[in-house]
Amino acid sequence: MSPSSVATRARSKERAGDTPEPSRPKTGPALRRRTDGRRWAPLGFLAPFGTLFAVTFVAPICYALYESLYKLHRSGLGLAPPSEVFAGLSNYTDALGDHAFTASIVRVVLIGLVQVPLMLGLALVLALLLDARRTPFKRFFRLSFFLPYAIPGVIGGLMWSFLYQPDVSPVAAALARIGLHVDFTSDGMLPWSVGNMLTWGWTGYNMIVIHSALKAIPGEFTEAAELDGCTGWRLAWHIKIPMVRPALVMTTVFSIIGMAQLYNEPVIMKAVAPNLAGDWTPIMAAQNEVAANNYHAAATRSVILALVIFALSFGFMRFVNKRGGAQ
């Protein structure tokens, strides 16, 4: 075949345009390997989080449950080292039979019933004011409301302890001038004093969360409501508050968990309120058992507290879901 004929055939192929044969889908082992790889890929991304979650959360819970089922047994005159024996649920019956421990749980729950709604209501009002169009000095007020949360809790507790101390309290002195003699460290005032410290420290944080949810509301909803004559507090009540309901639920659950874990504020208050018991909260009661080297009793109290937090949190979530379904 001459070179000219070869070139002519090549040009004819270019004009005709050779179309490649359609590729056939892969089947068999190759397809199974690719499918398995795609199936296990998400687990590879979740593995770091899952490992940390298991090590820092699941493992301590399992260990606390294990420790709560044992107790130390001393034989003879107590000169020999104690040995661990299986105790079953006796640690739980002892803890629930401890009046001081059960009273600490009831005390914290009662404080939360007053403090959590008051704090979140105040945070909601502040968030709505910041979201309003005609509120002046928004940046200044946003920073002012959030500033207490930015202050470390220990520093804030020391500051409030100074304000509560009867001898040097400027608040008590101001109230005394108008005939009101208030002792913020008395037994009857301690729950209110601690609740005030929590409200002061956490209202700004919850306000920022709710305000972020308000900013995420599409402008079309508020504009349509304003065209229909719904403005001011009517707009907030009928449009804004229902649309930030998930944020309100989330902040309530976090507040319930934080209230049940109350520890820093009452411990700091003990410096100015000697009448505050060492087991005033469940966490303080568990800490006392740790200080006494009774780790099994401490683990038992921690498990009971975790069950209380679980019951309160999921009970609230169930209540909210039922209310939402009814509406």
Image (cartoon, grey):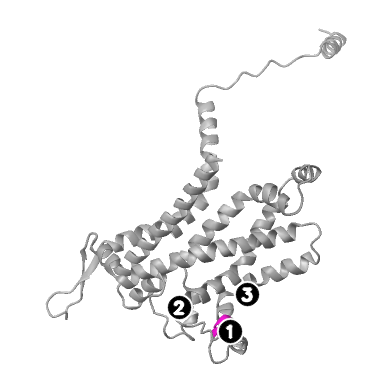
Q: Which residue in the protein does label 1 denote?
A: 163
- Few, some or many residues within 10 Å of mark 1 (<14, 14–19, 20+): some
Q: CA distance from mark 1 to mark 2?
A: 17 Å
Left of 263 or right of it: where is 97?
left
Three-letter residue code for mark 1:
Leu
Work out whether residue 17 or residue 316 is closer to the camera in this orientation and state it: 316
Taking the spot 52% from the left edge, 45% from the top edge, the residue there is 323
- Tell me if residue 261 can be seen: no
Work out whether residue 297 or residue 122 is closer to the camera in this orientation and state it: 122
- Tell me if residue 43 can be seen: yes
Q: Are the residues flagged by discs 1 and 3 in contact, CB closer than 8 Å?
A: no
Q: Position of residue 134 (x, y in %)?
A: 81, 59
Q: Are the residues flagged by discs 3 and 2 in contact, CB closer than 8 Å?
A: no
Q: Which residue in the protein does label 2 denote?
A: 188
* N-term mark: 3 or 2: 3
Q: Which mark is residue 326?
A: none
Q: Which residue in the protein does label 3 denote?
A: 151
